[in-house]
Structure formats: structure tokens, C-alpha cells
Amino acid sequence: MENLLDVNFLIESFPAILSRLPVTIGIAVGSLLLSLIIGVAAALIKIYKVPVLSVITSIYISFIRGTPLLVQIYLVFYGIPKIIYFLQSEYGWLQSADVNSIAPEFYALMAFSINLGAYLSETIRSAIESVDRGQFEAAKAIGMTPVQMMLKIVFPQALTVAIPNLGNMFISTIKDTSLVFIIGVIDIMGQAKILGSRGLAFFEVYIAVSIVYWILCIAVERLLVKIEKRARRYERGIA
Amino acid sequence: MIKLEKLHKYYDRQHVLKGIDLTVEKGEVVAVLGPSGSGKSTLLRCINFLEDPTSGIVEIGGKRVDAATAKKKEIFALRTATGMVFQQYNLFKNLTVLQNVSVGLTSVKRMKKDAADQKGIEMLEQVGLSNKLNHYPAQLSGGQQQRVGIARALALDPEVLLFDEPTSSLDPELVDEVLATIRRVADTGKTMFIVTHELSFAREISDRVIFMEDGVIIEQGTAEQIFTEPAVERTRQFLGKAVQG
């Protein structure tokens, strides 16, 4: 009789899949941090309507929103080596970079940072704009520089406002990292694929990997609720 | 001492301040009255360049700034020489009461945290809120928030305190505690510039009252003079109506 599932194979595949969990988490967390920098920069460029840069930023955001992530990953994977090679041969720049030794994880990190940065910038922009103007004025009135005002007053409040949205995007990113095996990164998805072909048991490994993603996302959601609660403590009025 | 010379402010084509000349002596308390849209708040906000005056000169404690050529450094000097209290309090919501008062000392005056905290506590004692140091603004009443606002403005030892309708967004029953605090500060000899709708308070606290309308100073004089025998009919009309209302 044909079994629906090879349960033993399914269970035995977990340790191997979990061994690649750091890759998945590393790309997700790394690109979250990098994309926060990109997102804040893009948001500020748009808020302050910096000439030239704000046009470039608008095009960047529009492009990222209007093209599939999969295509963007390929563009980064094939584009960056070509650009580096071009700069080396035409201008003699970046001589120390060896295109062939760049790990695929690096391209994955770049692609996800660029992608997430565009989405975050809109969230961050509206969060910054949600901080009431009066506090900007008060900060100016006591002589704070724009940078001090942003770091001490505006960003902490804007981040708090943005946490739910940032969290949702982060969870999406965790799931989207399952695309990175296409450029040769062995994340949990890549590992599942390898195990699946080795044992000819694809259904089993994909069940296993989906459980890993599921639990990871639930854990992150729980964590986000805690972070948000803590960040919002100053908003609680007289109890 | 504050000196304003030929201060003009345009919003697009709208001429909001039409050449204000004014001198406020050290220790003087000046109240600015006038109907809404008279330019009194704009005048106040031009003193520390929260609004850039279109032209004219602002001088505080010997620092002279020409609006036409004002540089960042000069504007910074004016802002540290003034302390401002806002109608909507404008406390930093992510900071505690004490941090609201000390943040200017640590970040602008580069004071050590301990010294800044100590000074912050002193300032909060002055406004009667030293028991709320670790509360957040959202946990305070409007009156308490405004008193923190006053402590924050005082902390930087400004030459002059600017009050922009400090009681206008308060519930009536909270107005008194704020006015009492302002009165206490006035008694310490601070130079103060108060835009207000509280006529009886203005009369009681100020050395001089300025009546503005339509971007110009229509009349000024001692509080007694303005309130008992204003020289200009418009002032009489405004004060009379407001007292009845």
C-alpha cells in the first residue's frame, strides 16, 4: 500500500533544515537593518524635498514597487558583478574586489535591502510626519540641531508608530527569503530542496520547511507585540 | 534686553507684520494683546526665528541679527538666548518630565547628565512638579504639562522668556496654576514677553502692555494706563468687549 507521507523522513529532515536557519534569519535581519538605513534616508530626502535626490528616490520606490522581487534578485545577482567588473576595467576602481569570490548571500542581502528599503521609506515617511509639528518647533526653540531633533525626539516616536507596519514587512521578508535559493544560497528552503531531491520526498520536506517558516513567523509576531508594548509605554495616559 | 527694528513679515503677499519697532528692557514684563490675526503670535515667533522675519533686525542681549542675512549660527544664538512656552505645551512625548527639561542642557549646552538632571530637578521644583520627574507627558494634566513647558524654557537660562498664549488651550480650572507659575517666574526678575488673552492677568503681571492690530502696534503703555484710559478708540473697544465677554 502506498503511504501518503513518509513520516520518518519528514521528521528526520528537520535537523538538516534547521541547520540553515541562521542563513534565513541572517538575510532577513541583515536586510531589515540595512533597509532601515535606506528607508530613513529616502524618507528624509522626500520630506525635505532634496532637489535631484528626491526625484531619484521617487523613481527608485516606483521601480521597486512595480517589479517582481524575483526579477530584482536576478538584477542584483547579475548586475553587481558586471558593474564591479566594468569599474575595474574602465576606471581601475575596486581593484581589491574579486567578483568570483563574492558569496551569493551578499547578493541576497543587497537585493532584499534594496527591496525592503523602498517599502519601508513610505512607512517611515508617514511615521515621521505623524509626529506633531509642535515638538519640532519646541526642539528648534531650545536650540537643537536638526540632527539632534531627529535622533532624540522624532525618530523614537516615529519608530514606535511604525512598528506594526515594520513588523508586517519584516515577516513578509522572512517568507520572501525562500526565493534566495535561485541564486545559489542554501537557506532553509534551499536545504529542503536538496533533501527532497536526495530522498525523492518533496512533499515531506516542503511540509517540514513550511512548519519551520510558520513557527518562525509566529515567534517573530510574539516578539513584535512585546517590543511594541514596550515602545509605547510613554503613550499611556493617567491609568 | 530685546530690540526689534522695522520687523516685517510676509506670508506670500499677506503682510502680517508691518514694521515693528520695539525695545524691551531687562527684567521688564511685556504683555501683547490684540484680536486674532493681529500678528501678535507671529511677532513672538519672529523673535527666535521660528518664523523667519522677511526683513528687519532682532537684537537680544547685544546679539544683533539682520533677517536679510541671518546665518544658522546667529539664529542658534537667538534661540539659546530665548526660552519659549507654547500654547499646545509641545512637550517631547517620548521623554519623561525630567528628560524634557534636561535634554536641552545635555544636547545643546553639552552639560554632563548628572549636572543636567540636578538642574532639571531644580527647575521642576520651581514649577512645583519635582514629584513627577519620571512621568511621561501623557500622564499629566494640561496645567502640569504647561508647567513642565515653563521649566524646560527656564532651564537654559534664557535672557528672555517668550509665552505664546500659554493658557489658551487649558481647561478654565487649570488656568490658575499656570498663571501662578508664570507670576512666580516674573517675580524672579526674568524678562518676559507674553502674548495672551487673559486680560486681567496681563494687567496684573505686566510692566507694559502692547496692543496690536493688523500687523502694527496701535498703542502701548503701562498696564494701568492701557486698561483705565486707553488713548486709542480701538483699544478701548477691544478691552471693553473682552472684559464683558
Image (spheres, coloured by chain):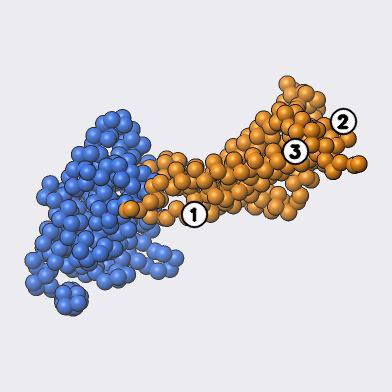
The residue that appears at 13% across and 59% down in the rendered structure is: B206
* Residue named by callout 1: A129
Q: Position of residue A26 (x, y in %)?
A: 65, 32
* Residue named by callout 3: A208
Q: Secondary structure at mark 1?
A: helix
Residue type at mark 3: give it: Ala
Q: Which mark is residue A198?
A: 2
Chain B rendering hue: blue
Are the numbered discs 1 and 2 placed on the same chain, yes or no? Answer: yes
- Which class describes the residues within 10 Å of circle 3: few (<14), some (14-19), or many (20+)? many
Q: Secondary structure at mark 2?
A: helix
Seen from this angle, which residue lies furthest right?
A1
**Chain to which the residue tagged by mark 3 belongs:** A
In this rendering, position of residue A9 left or right of residue B215: right
**Chain to which the residue tagged by mark 2 belongs:** A
Q: Earlier in the sequence, mark 2 or mark 3?
A: 2
Q: Secondary structure at mark 3?
A: helix
Q: Position of residue A102 (x, y in %)?
A: 76, 27
Q: Which chain is orange?
A: A
Res B186 visible: no
Placement of the C terminus of chain B among the 4 image quadrants: bottom left
Q: Nearer the viewer, residue B66 or A180?
A: A180
Are the numbered discs 2 and 3 placed on the same chain, yes or no? Answer: yes
In this rendering, position of residue B98 left or right of residue A170: left
The residue that appears at 18% across and 43% down in the rendered structure is: B125
